[in-house]
Amino acid sequence: MSLSPTVPTEVADRVWVARHAWFDVNVTYVAGERGLVVVDTHASTRMGREVVETARSLGAGAVVGVVTTHAHHDHVLGTAAVRDAYGEVPVHAHEACVEELEAWAADRPAYAGEEAEPGEVDASPVVLPDHPFSSAAVLDLGDRVLELVHPGRGHTSGDLVVRIADADVLLAGDLVEESAPPAYGPDSFPMEWPLALDVCLQLCTDRTVVVPGHGAPVDRAFVRDQRADIGVVAETIRDLAGRGIRVEQALEVGEWPLDRSVLGHAVTRGYQHLPASQKRLPLL
């Protein structure tokens, strides 16, 4: 797989998004008087070097911080290259993201997907965020602030979003996806995800540019519609479990707003997370 350098797009005042072909993942650069903050660093050290080259090309100062939206490898493995270029810049993340990333690094599975250079993912070191927070944090760039908010568990336990109020931008990580359906993985929280998106919607206006983890920027209406689908998934799980439908039968029995092929983990995790009071004994 050959990859061409990605040209960033300025989606708002001094907010640039580079949408990369590999993983269709977004890396965002936010500039202020004190320098640049990079939000997510892509999937390998090689791609992290491209992140550094892009940051330098913007002419907006040195990188003074990294923000990690969640612990998945396609968003974090370029961080070592950023630190190689700019020194021990702080890496901000939610505290649960740090725990998830540490656990993943300790029992790291071999990567089996497509990559530009053989072994580049497995050879990329993990840099654990060293500036964790529990609910909210603020990054001061002098003439603007970045608000880091943990809206609740959804795509993972440690999701965060970044609000740039003066530019009316929300960086949503993988709580929102434009180029694919919502990504329910084995570490997702399908019953809580709708509530996390409710918080995101409260952080948006009708003019907000929302940058998803993957795909093109969207607006508040898109987030509202995706929240509706995720909410229906959660309520369908709750209804099926409440009627005594076995988890093994739920995908076939339920009427789902998304393709069944992407809902396996959603159903399994949803049944696991429901309290016993909301589940009936399976019907014979």
Image (spheres, rainbow, N blue to C red):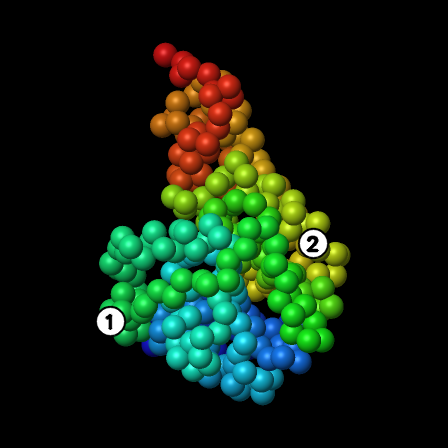
Residue 174 visible, this angle: no
Question: Which of the 4 image quarters holds residue 170?
Answer: bottom right
Q: Amino acid at mark 2?
A: Leu
Classify 10 Å Cα crowding around label 1: few (below 14), some (14-19), many (20 and above). few
Q: Secondary structure at mark 1?
A: loop
Depth check: give the residue in front, 197 or 64.
Answer: 64
**Residue furthest top as drawn:** 284
Depth check: give the residue in front, 61 or 8.
Answer: 61
Whether 4 is drawn above or below 76: the answer is below
Q: Mark number for residue 203?
A: 2
Whether 207 is drawn above or below 143: the answer is above
Q: Position of residue 25 (x, y in %)?
A: 47, 65
Measured in 3D between alpha carbons, the distance from the residue under mark 1 to the one under mark 2, in whole angstroms, is 41 Å
Q: Position of residue 22 (x, y in %)?
A: 40, 68
Q: Nearer the N terminus, badge 1 or badge 2? A: 1
Whether 237 is drawn above or below 143: the answer is above
Classify 10 Å Cα crowding around label 2: few (below 14), some (14-19), many (20 and above). many
Residue, disc 1: 118
Measuring 28% from the left and 74% from the top, which residue is drawn there? 117
Q: Position of residue 7 (x, y in %)?
A: 52, 80
User: How many marks can you see?
Assistant: 2
Measuring 32% from the left and 57% from the top, which residue is drawn there? 105
Q: Is residue 239 left or right of residue 209?
A: left
Q: Amino acid at mark 1?
A: Pro
Measuring 65% from the left and 77% from the top, which residue is drawn there? 32
Residue 276 visible, this angle: yes
